[in-house]
Amino acid sequence: MDLVPALEEPLKKVLGPATAKVMAEHLGLHSVGDLLHHYPRRYEERGQLTHLADLPMDEHVTVVAQVADARLHTFASAKAPRGKGQRLEVTITDGSGRLQLVFFGNGVHKPHKDLLPGTRALFAGKVSLFNRRLQLAHPAYELLRGADDEAAETVETWAGALIPIYPATAKLESWKIGKAIQTVLPSAQEAVDPLPESLREGRGLVPLSEALLKIHRPHTKADIADAHARLKWDEAFVLQVALARRRHADAQLPAVPRKPAPDGLLSAFDDRLPFTLTDGQQKVSKEIFDDLATDHPMHRLLQGEVGSGKTMVALRAMLAVVDAGGQAAMLAPTEVLAQQHHRSIVEMMGELAEGGMLGGSEHGTKVVLLTGSMGTAARRQAMLDLVTGEAGIVIGTHALIEDKVQFHDLGLVVVDEQHRFGVEQRDALRGKGKQPPHLLVMTATPIPRTVAMTVFGDLETSVLDQLPAGRSPIASHVVPAADKPHFLARAWERVREEVENGHQAYVVCPRIGDEEDDPKKARKSAEDEAEKRPPLAVLDIADQLAKGPLSGLRVEVLHGRMHPDDKDAVMRRFAAGEAHVLVATTVIEVGVNVPNATAMVIMDADRFGVSQLHQLRGRVGRGSAAGLCLLVSEMPEASPARQRLNAVASTLDGFELSRIDLEQRREGDVLGQAQSGARTSLRVLAVIEDEEIIAEARQEATAVVEADPELTGLPGLRTALDALLDEEREQYLEKG
């Protein structure tokens, strides 16, 4: 029987079933290797104390601190009517701040004996608020005492003066994870190194086994730095090898080159354009046309500011493919957006969109829409036009992916707002071509170069960073509704002024408002503080505005649960100027284009992400009149939420905003949602800080894969890839 390699040994064999069960369920750790890759979040120095002032609310924390004061209170309660109820209040300090710990009932005896003033300990628990003060209720603790104590043995097993603090859970404190790691640390000697030796030596990186030892048992800060330098390279390199292998595999696939005819549909379209393309649009179009002309499938990410003219670039690519005898499909995430794209493309093309119809152009083609809610007859006709090749361009939602939909010759797939589509959908549509079609992915969320390289590393990237002529500047302001209610009143006056000047406005809310009332939720929100109230809702706000500050104006609502025909009718009325104010959810976030809409008020703006706010704001200022975006929030001035809003208000540069957003959120949610297993998401690599490592790793990875696509000479790298690319992870890389 084969022996299981040390790092693949299940934790239940090494640590016992109870601990292993908690590690698997709460931390996603199953094997010795998983546990060794569960790195400390930070380190406490035994001689120093932590910063109690910086503790985050509602998070599970571990702190090193000293007991300043401990008092036992006796009180009467329903369970102890004769004054026998007991509560122990312990105040701990770090020299700069204080934190209260509370213990109740039978749980007071041991801490009352242990936690005497002057005692130093590790404390772990969830930070909560009581009487406006931070506290830990019933925290677990581990004393840090002299060598004569039994507890000192656990302390001494930690190296030097640095105590590793691990990402922990309520069921498993940091020091228990530390003890478990001490048990498995000898196995680190058997770790197979994923980095080629020449790369490791050339860059002066320590071997993997040494890096694991130094990250878990550092004697000095230099040890931690060595370990981090090495482990960052592992993460960047293995990830880039995965992406390089996919680029390499895609480059082996055949595709039909699509070159536009010299005097065909594209030329006819360009001739009727009432404006000239920006330099950026021309440069990006050339990159796309060069890719389309090759006999390997194009894989290109087109990212650009809201309103930078991505749709125009994508449409010209689709026309080039139709010119070359193929068909193009554009996949949109919502029906509202698909209808909007269809309408604007048909308008831009004019008679060129009426191929085969009376009055249509000789160069023209049919442009059809396909969505799930279309009537049977219209749907059947659209599908017939696709299978016969009559329709050169189709715009649709997930309905395009269904098995019944067949193409005559699919040459190009354009995916709008990539982050909303899964790998299955992208592949299902690509599978409808006789040979793999070319792929153009568009996103209006500007992504810093390094994130694009790590998440979309299998796509070549094109960036549109100029706005077309005629776009107006947008002024953005934060409206602090709780601190200064008169600012909110003024916001509604501004909306009225815009309407009186012949313009229109959007009001955006986080929620629809027709949800079933959940009594549990209602009970919870009543008990919670004001900041936990439910988000403001479209139906409530529309009603309040129509009866109050905006009475007399035509106010309409738009949200995702409306019937598609009703949604389309509302959008048509708003686009035609028949409605003054549209109160909507984020269904208007992308693609909605009404140049006459100049003002937007976003209610509970702190409940939206930075990129979402930036996207929403891009709906105004689309015509010649200046745009106005008001971010309404009840959050206090010093809160991180308000700082985020101030950042959005201070710049219109989406790339700058996405950096701010990443620095605040970290990239945990960029490179993996709830990724299973310790090795499947970034532990030490920080996408923004480590730009250089990621760029260098990409070069190294490309060279390694070109020399040895199957990695036959690098078994350690193959093992690391298998660990990184579990199924869920591989899909996430594709989804972006």
Image (cartoon, rainbow, N blue to C red):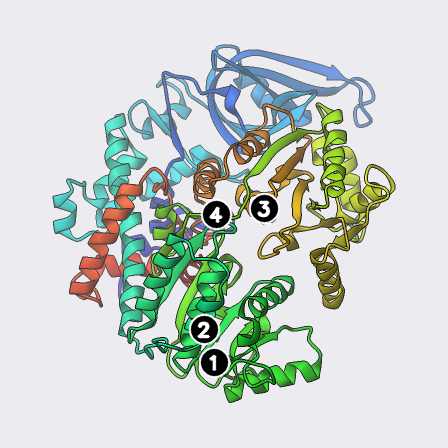
Residue 336 coordinates in the image, percent (x, y): 65, 62
Q: Earlier in the sequence, mark 3 or mark 1?
A: 1
Whether residue 390 is visible here, answered yes or no, is: yes
Q: Image quarter for residue 283?
A: bottom left
Residue bearing the label numbered 3: 624
Residue 128 coordinates in the image, percent (x, y): 63, 28
Circle 4 or circle 1, nearest the eye? 1
Three-letter code for the amino acid on which mark 3 is drawn? Ser
Q: Are marks 2 and 1 in contact (CB under 8 Å)?
A: yes
Binning the other alpha carbons within 10 Å of mark 2 as few (below 14), some (14 to 19) or many (20 upward) gives: some
Residue 85 coordinates in the image, percent (x, y): 74, 21
Q: Earlier in the sequence, mark 2 or mark 1?
A: 2
Q: Nearer the viewer, residue 664 or 554?
A: 554
Q: Earlier in the sequence, mark 4 or mark 1?
A: 1
Tag of residue 363: 1
Three-letter code for the amino acid on which mark 4 is drawn? Asp
Residue bearing the label numbered 4: 669
